[in-house]
Amino acid sequence: MGDGKITQTILVVGGGISGLTAALEAAEAGHEVIIVEKNPYLGGKVTQLYQYFPKLCPPNCGLEINFKRIRSNPRIRFFTMAQLAGVSGSPGDFEVQIKISPRYVNERCTCCGECAKVCETEIPNPFNFGLDKIKAAYLPHEFAFPMRYVIDPSIVGTEEGKRVAEACSYGAIDLGMKEETLTLKAGTIIWAAGWEPYEASKIEYYGFGVYPNVINNIMMERLASPVGPTGGKILRPSDKKEAKRVAFVQCAGSRDENHLAYCSSICCLASLKQANYLMETSPEAAATIFFIDIRAMDRLEDFYTMIKANDRIRFIKSKIAMITEDEATHDLLVEGENTQTGEQVRERFDLVVLATGMAPNKVPEWLLPYVGLDEYGFVINNGSNKGVFGAGCVRRPSDVATSVQDSTAAALKAIQTIVRR
Amino acid sequence: MADPKKKGKAEGPVSYDPSFSKEVFEKVDYGEKIKMCMQCGVCAASCPLSMVMDYSPRKIFALIRAGKRSEVLSSKAIMLCTSCYSCKVRCPRKVPVVDVMHGLANYALKQGYVPREETALFGREFWKQILRLGRIDEKDLPRRYFFSKGIIPGIKKSMELADMGIVLMLHKRMKLLPERSVKGIKELRKMLEKASAMGNGGA
Ligand SMILES: Cc1cc2nc3c(=O)[nH]c(=O)nc-3n(C[C@H](O)[C@H](O)[C@H](O)COP(=O)(O)OP(=O)(O)OC[C@H]3O[C@@H](n4cnc5c(N)ncnc54)[C@H](O)[C@@H]3O)c2cc1C
Ligand code: SF4
Ligand code: SF4
């Protein structure tokens, strides 16, 4: 352990709700914290949700409180567009490499948007999963923290890039920025890299990525959002017509030995919530939820009961076995067996939302000597951790409340690693 | 409580009866694998023959759990499975549905359940043709099968399917001329005879 000194700094990888929680808990207990976030903004997937179940409130309120706590806490430093690139040493005395990609915009940015006005190149909007396009000089999203533009590398080194840089009257655009790697000390590491939606194109018989009107549940959050690609209208990707008959296909990839063998735990609630989004768009809209069984646990069952009371939301007990497209209309035919009546299901829909499950973001090979994984790739926090702990959805698929609890526990584990010595 | 004497015969809800499940787990090839089934219905909706089956594969597994021995062993479904494997590749619980269906068919035969008349007829004609030609003649087999039940039903069935026959011919899926036998048909016959002497025969 080098000179035997214990570094009191805690490194948090991932600035989603879990990473933010762990960072704040540790910092408010008196530790120095560094957050490393891959995206150009903090908040993770929660920033992309329209409403939170079960209260149906906007997720940005909760995030805003956390950002305020971060701003007012001098013990927290964070890097965006940054990733952990390497670790050496041992618990209490890690040396970590942090790779930072160039944003090409510095802290002088006032978000006036003049750069975007002169920019002509458009790129698929990553925040909306490519459902729309944005300028190559962009603000990642409306409530981005830090509130600062990003220049896409595609225009760097071009004439257009120069024009974009010149349009900024604050001198905030610096196209000469390079990727850099920092080497820092940390006593312990909290891995809070979160999750990705399961790659639904792997479930070939659902046609995701082939039929434009088959989308996943996180895309549905963007469609429902008033600041999303469709201004909050649920429009079909194929013809931008309002979707009236919408199918929700539960367990898309989850509870399936060929894909994710576990239950992703949040997708039932997510679909119930999204069926409710749809109800609010039009009195003619109707939702059908195809399920194996609905998993709404504890207090969340009340939400299920409330949604079930709506007679425009149908529940059919059937795992869907096939989705095909009517080429002329881009409508979708959904097939399964209703296991309560024994009848074959074959119904037409405007839009199909796959309730895709959560796959944990992978722990890099070189970090594995310090932290164990279970058979599905989720991080295990038990006695065998060597200074690295998981927090939130990297530990198990979970909703925000559970992720927050887990991250508080992870912060405590991390603190114990450095104070014990 | 259900009357125990009526067990297995009752309409509507049935009580759980593990006796037949146990028999299936122990005696049917791959029978134990149905323990994994979660009754999701993916196999049923993946099966191209489910519309002509009396019970979908999922229902067969539910009937086994309900102790419905004779319904299962005399069902069309277990005889109709054509081994397309759609169910097996999709089953989220990795139940080898095809293998279980064949296991059940084989077990049913051993238990003295006679498959449906048509299936037996078709099977016999199929084997006769394999022994004769070493291959299947796409028009001769159905013809023999249709006419095996008599001339009138034979003509009726042929008329019914004439359109499909024409399309098959147009797409070169069916030849007009009779098929010739494969090379080495005599050796093939010997192999088949030996195989049938060794095994107990299939469906
Ligand atoms: C469709 C849908 C709807 C949902 N709705 C709700 C809801 O209504 N209510 C609710 O409570 N929960 C909901 N959830 C669950 C919720 O999204 C999660 O609980 C939450 O996102 C967990 O936060 P996290 O921080 O663990 O992960 P994430 O939100 O994924 O955050 C992880 C962060 O780490 C960053 N990162 C990843 N890899 C690296 C790396 N190598 N280096 C640096 N940074 C990295 C990511 O960019 C991200 O910012 C929903 C989930 C889905 C799929
Ligand atoms: S939460 Fe619901 S949809 Fe998601 S895997 Fe579990 S049962 Fe399936
Ligand atoms: S697909 Fe598999 S799990 Fe589902 S009903 Fe069929 S055998 Fe059971």
Image (cartoon, rainbow, N blue to C red):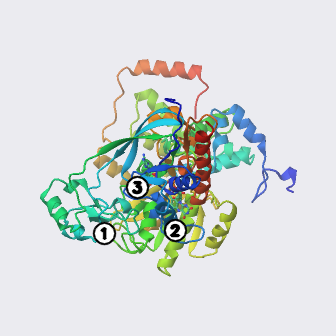
In the image, the residue with mark 2 has its CB under 8 Å from the nearest atom of ligand 1: yes
Structural distance between the alpha carbons of marks 1 and 2: 32 Å
Image point (59%, 66%), residue name: A315
Tell me the amino acid under the disc marked 2: Gln
**Disc nearest the viewer among 1 and 3:** 1
Q: Earlier in the sequence, mark 1 or mark 3?
A: 1
Seen in the image, is A235 located left or right of residue B196?
A: left
Q: How many marks?
A: 3
**Residue at 73% from the left image edge and 41% from the top image edge:** B21
Q: Are marks 1 and 3 in contact (CB under 8 Å)?
A: no
Are discs 1 and 3 located on one and the same chain? yes
Q: Amino acid at mark 3?
A: Phe
| Spot occupied by residue A369 in the image (x, y as percentages of width and height) | 51, 31
Residue carrying label 2:
A274
Circle nearer the viewer, 1 or 2: 1
| Residue annotated with mark 3 | A208
Q: Write down the quadrant of residue B37 in the picture.
A: top right
Q: Is residue B94 above or below residue B154?
A: above
| Callouts 1 and 2 in the same chain | yes
Q: Chain of mark 2?
A: A
Q: Residue A208: x percent and y percent? A: 40, 55
Distance from the alpha carbon under mark 2 to that under mark 3: 19 Å
Image quarter in which the N terminus of chain B is found: bottom right
Q: Which residue is mark 1?
A: A111
Query: Is the residue marked 3 within 8 Å of ligand 1, measured from its CB?
Result: no
Q: Mark 1 belongs to which amino acid? A: Cys
